C-alpha cells in the first residue's frame, strides 16, 4: 500500500490518510471552505464510501484574525471593540463576558448600577434571539425550507433596529463597557421593546408550526448525530448542544452573573441527543429568552448606567466644559486608560452557543496581559468528527447546522 | 477583589458558591501531585493548583474521579520575560450525570490547574487519552505558543497556515509579525518589521 503521488496538498494531514484510500475504494472530498452550507469558512475533509462518511476532519482557521493578540495590544476599555468581533452573530455576549471579567479584576462588580445590569441582561437575551433566528433560517434553508429564512430574518431585523436605535450600530455595538454602558437608552425605547415583546411570540409560533412537525424536517433530523450525555460531556459540548443530550447545565443558572438569578426562566432540555433534539431545544430557548426580555422591560429601573468612578469611566461631556478636573480625567482615560490590579480570572457567560469563557490575566498595566477565549463553538464543532462517520454526506449539512458554529469565534 | 463573585445588587448568596464542591479537593490534589506541586490557592473565581508538568496526569485523573468530567478549556499564557514563562491553564467543570441524566443544580463547580513547563523546551503531557476534546485545544496551544504535548496523536497547526514560522501569541512575537507576505506594489517579500506601538 503506497500513497498516491502528486497529491502534495494533503501530505501534512495525517487524519486524511490518502494511503488508506485505495484499500476500500474510497473517495476523498473537500467540502468547503466555499460551500454554502458550511456557514462561513469551514472545510471538512470527508472520506466517503459511496455516500457514507467514513471519516470527517474539519479544517479551521480560515477566519483567524488574531483577536486575542489584538486585545493584548489595546487598552482595557479599547479592547471591548475587538472582543465584540469574535462571535459576530452575538457580539454583545462576547463583550459582556469581557467586561464582567475586567470588572471582577477591578473589584467593581457590586457597584454596577441596577439599570445597567437590567439592560445588559435584556440585550444579551435579545442577542440570543437574534442569533438563534439566524441559525433557524440558515439551518432550515440547508434542509430545503427556503421561506423560513425570510420569516426569521424579518424578525431579526426588528431586533437589529432596536440595537441601532439604542447604540447606533446594527452589529458590533460595543455598547457594554467596563463600569456599565456606553450611553443610556434614548426616549421611546420601552415602546420599541414593548412592540417587539408583543409581536414575537406569534411569529415564533408561526415558524414552529411550519417546521417542528414538518415531515421533511423530522426525516432529516431525527436519529441523525445521536449523542449520549456522557459523550457530550467528554467532547466538551456546552449550551443547547449539551442540553439536547439531557444535561441540564446552563451558566446562567449554575454560576449566575448580572443578576440572572432574579429572573424566572426555564432551561429547556431534551433527551433525544440527535439533531432534532438540538433543533427543539433552540426553539424553546428563544421562547425563554423572550420571557426574560419581557421581565427586564417590566422591572426597568431608573438611575445611572455607569459607575461613579472617574478613574475608570470618563465624566459626562457637559461636566468637561466647566470642570478642569473632569477634563484631566477625560484626557487621562483617553490617552493612558486605567490600570487593572494584577491577577487572573475566569469568567463565563451563556452565549447563544454555550459556555463562552474568558481567562483574563492582568499584569497590573493599562492593557490586558492575556485574554484567552473559551470559544463554545470551537469545542462544539470539534464533535463533528465524532458525529459524522456513519452518516450520509447530506447529513453532514444537517450536523453542521445543528451544532451552530460561528467561525468568527472558532478561529478568532 | 470582591468576596462574593457575581453581579447585581441586593442578592443573597453564600460566599464562594462556585466551590461548594471543591473544598476537600485541594488537599487531596496536594498529596496526589506530590513533588510536582508549586502552589495551591483559592482565588476569587475558583480553587486552583499550580504544578509542574510531571503531576498533570495524576491531578487530572483525581479531578475526574471527583466528578470534574468536562474539560472546559486548555489555554496558554506567556509571562515573558518572567520565569517560568509559560502557563498552561486547564479549566475543569464538575458535572455529574445520574442514571436519568438529571444534573443536580447545586453540583456544578470549577477547578483550575496551572501547569508551568520548562522555558526552553516547553513540554506537557497530553490529555487526549482521557478527554477527546483536548485534541484541538492542544493543537491550538501548540500553534500559538509552541507548547509540545507528549502523546498527542497529531500535533500540527490548526489556525495558522501549515508553513507558518513562529508562534504568534508569544510575547516576543511582534503584533504585526516578523515579515509581511504582501508589500505595496503587489510584490511578495519580506520587509523590516513595523515598529510596535
Image (spheres, coloured by chain):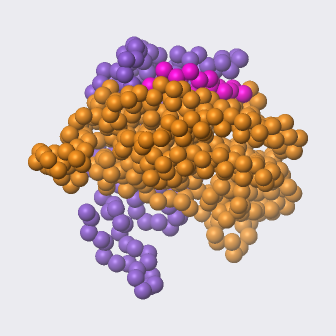
Q: Nearer the viewer, residue B65 or A219?
A: A219
Single out the residue that lies furthest toward the left. Answer: A324
Q: Nearer the viewer, residue B71 or A184?
A: A184
Magenta segment includes B53? no
Q: Can you tell which quarter of the image residue A35 is in? A: bottom right
Chain with colour orange in the figure: A
Q: Nearer the viewer, residue B75 or A294?
A: A294
Residue at 56 percent across and 61 percent down: it is A62
Residue at 66 percent across and 27 percent down: it is A268
Q: Is residue A368 left or right of residue B73?
A: left
Residues rendered magenta in the picture: A246-270
Chain B drawn in what color? purple
Q: Quadrant of the C terminus of chain B?
A: bottom left
In the image, residue A262 above or below residue A135: above
Q: Is residue B19 in view? A: yes
Q: Is residue B115 in view? A: no
Main SS of the magenta part reads: loop
Q: Position of residue B47 (x, y in %)?
A: 38, 24
Q: Quadrant of the N terminus of chain B?
A: top left
Q: Is residue B136 left or right of residue A132?
A: left
Q: Is residue A60 left or right of residue A119?
A: right
Residue at 81 percent across and 46 percent down: it is A390
Q: Position of residue A41 (x, y in %)?
A: 62, 60
Q: Nearer the viewer, residue B165 or B35?
A: B165
Q: Position of residue A214 (x, y in %)?
A: 85, 40
Residue at 22 percent across and 47 percent down: it is A318
Magenta segment includes A268? yes
Single out the residue that lies furthest toward the right. Answer: A215
In the image, residue A33 above or below residue A131: below
Q: Position of residue A163 (x, y in %)?
A: 50, 47
Amino acid at each position: 500500500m503506497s500513497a498516491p503521488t502528486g497529491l502534495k496538498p494533503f501530505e501534512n494531514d495525517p487524519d486524511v490518510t490518502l494511503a488508506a484510500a485505495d484499500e476500500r475504494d474510497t473517495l476523498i472530498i473537500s467540502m468547503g471552505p466555499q460551500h454554502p452550507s458550511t456557514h462561513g469558512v469551514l472545510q471538512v475533509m470527508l472520506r466517503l464510501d459511496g455516500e457514507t462518511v467514513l471519516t470527517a476532519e474539519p479544517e479551521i482557521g480560515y477566519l483567524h484574525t488574531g483577536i486575542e493578540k489584538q486585545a493584548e495590544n489595546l487598552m482595557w476599555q479599547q479592547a471591548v471593540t475587538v472582543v465584540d468581533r469574535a462571535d459576530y452573530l452575538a457580539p454583545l455576549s462576547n463583550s459582556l463576558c469581557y467586561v464582567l471579567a475586567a470588572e471582577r479584576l477591578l473589584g467593581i462588580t457590586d457597584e454596577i448600577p441596577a439599570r445597567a445590569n437590567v439592560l445588559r441582561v435584556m440585550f444579551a437575551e435579545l442577542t440570543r434571539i437574534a442569533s438563534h433566528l439566524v441559525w433557524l433560517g440558515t439551518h432550515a434553508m440547508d434542509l430545503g425550507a427556503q421561506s423560513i429564512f425570510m420569516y426569521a430574518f424579518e424578525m431579526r431585523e426588528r431586533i437589529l433596529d432596536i440595537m441601532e436605535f439604542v447604540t447606533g450600530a446594527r452589529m458590533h455595538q460595543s455598547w457594554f463597557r467596563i463600569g456599565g454602558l456606553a450611553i443610556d437608552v434614548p426616549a421611546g425605547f420601552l415602546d420599541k421593546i414593548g412592540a417587539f415583546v408583543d409581536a414575537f411570540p406569534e411569529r415564533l409560533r408561526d415558524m414552529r408550526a411550519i417546521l417542528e412537525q414538518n415531515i421533511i424536517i423530522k426525516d432529516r433530523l431525527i436519529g441523525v448525530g445521536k449523542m449520549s450525555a456522557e459523550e457530550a460531556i467528554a467532547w466538551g459540548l456546552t449550551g443547547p448542544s449539551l442540553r439536547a443530550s439531557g444535561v441540564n447545565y446552563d451558566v446562567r443558572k449554575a454560576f449566575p452573573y448580572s443578576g440572572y438569578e432574579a429572573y424566572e426562566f426555564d432551561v429547556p432540555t431534551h433527551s433525544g441527543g440527535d439533531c432534532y433534539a438540538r433543533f427543539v431545544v433552540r426553539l424553546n430557548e428563544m421562547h425563554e429568552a423572550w420571557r426574560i426580555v419581557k421581565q427586564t422591560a417590566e422591572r426597568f429601573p431608573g438611575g445611572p448606567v455607569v459607575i461613579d468612578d472617574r478613574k475608570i469611566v470618563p465624566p459626562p461631556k457637559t461636566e468637561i466644559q466647566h470642570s478642569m478636573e473632569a477634563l484631566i480625567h477625560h484626557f487621562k482615560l483617553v490617552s493612558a486608560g486605567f490600570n487593572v490590579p494584577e491577577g487572573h480570572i475566569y469568567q463565563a457567560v451563556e452565549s447563544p452557543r454555550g459556555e463562552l469563557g474568558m481567562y483574563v490575566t492582568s499584569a497590573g498595566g493599562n492593557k490586558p496581559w492575556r485574554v484567552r477565549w473559551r470559544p463554545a463553538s470551537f469545542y462544539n464543532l470539534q464533535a463533528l468528527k465524532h458525529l459524522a462517520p456513519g452518516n450520509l454526506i447530506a447529513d453532514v449539512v444537517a450536523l453542521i447546522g445543528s451544532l451552530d458554529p460561528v467561525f468568527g469565534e472558532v478561529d478568532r | 477583589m470582591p468576596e462574593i463573585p457575581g453581579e447585581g445588587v441586593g442578592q443573597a448568596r453564600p460566599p464562594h458558591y462556585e466551590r461548594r464542591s471543591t473544598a476537600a479537593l485541594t488537599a487531596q490534589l496536594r498529596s496526589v501531585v506530590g513533588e510536582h506541586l508549586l502552589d495551591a490557592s483559592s482565588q476569587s473565581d475558583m480553587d486552583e493548583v499550580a504544578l509542574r508538568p510531571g503531576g498533570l496526569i495524576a491531578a487530572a485523573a483525581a479531578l475526574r474521579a471527583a466528578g470534574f468530567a468536562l474539560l472546559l478549556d486548555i489555554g496558554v499564557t506567556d509571562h515573558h520575560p518572567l520565569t517560568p514563562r509559560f502557563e498552561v491553564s486547564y479549566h475543569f467543570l464538575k458535572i455529574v450525570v445520574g442514571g436519568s441524566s438529571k444534573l443536580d443544580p447545586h453540583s456544578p463547580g470549577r477547578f483550575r490547574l496551572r501547569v508551568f513547563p520548562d522555558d526552553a523546551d516547553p513540554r506537557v503531557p497530553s490529555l487526549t487519552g482521557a478527554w477527546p476534546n483536548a485534541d484541538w485545544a492542544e493543537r491550538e496551544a501548540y500553534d500559538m505558543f509552541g507548547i509540545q504535548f507528549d502523546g498527542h496523536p497529531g500535533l500540527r497547526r490548526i489556525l495558522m497556515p501549515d508553513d507558518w514560522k513562529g508562534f504568534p501569541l508569544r510575547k516576543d512575537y511582534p503584533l504585526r509579525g516578523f515579515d509581511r507576505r504582501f508589500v505595496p506594489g503587489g510584490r511578495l517579500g519580506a520587509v523590516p518589521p513595523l515598529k510596535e506601538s
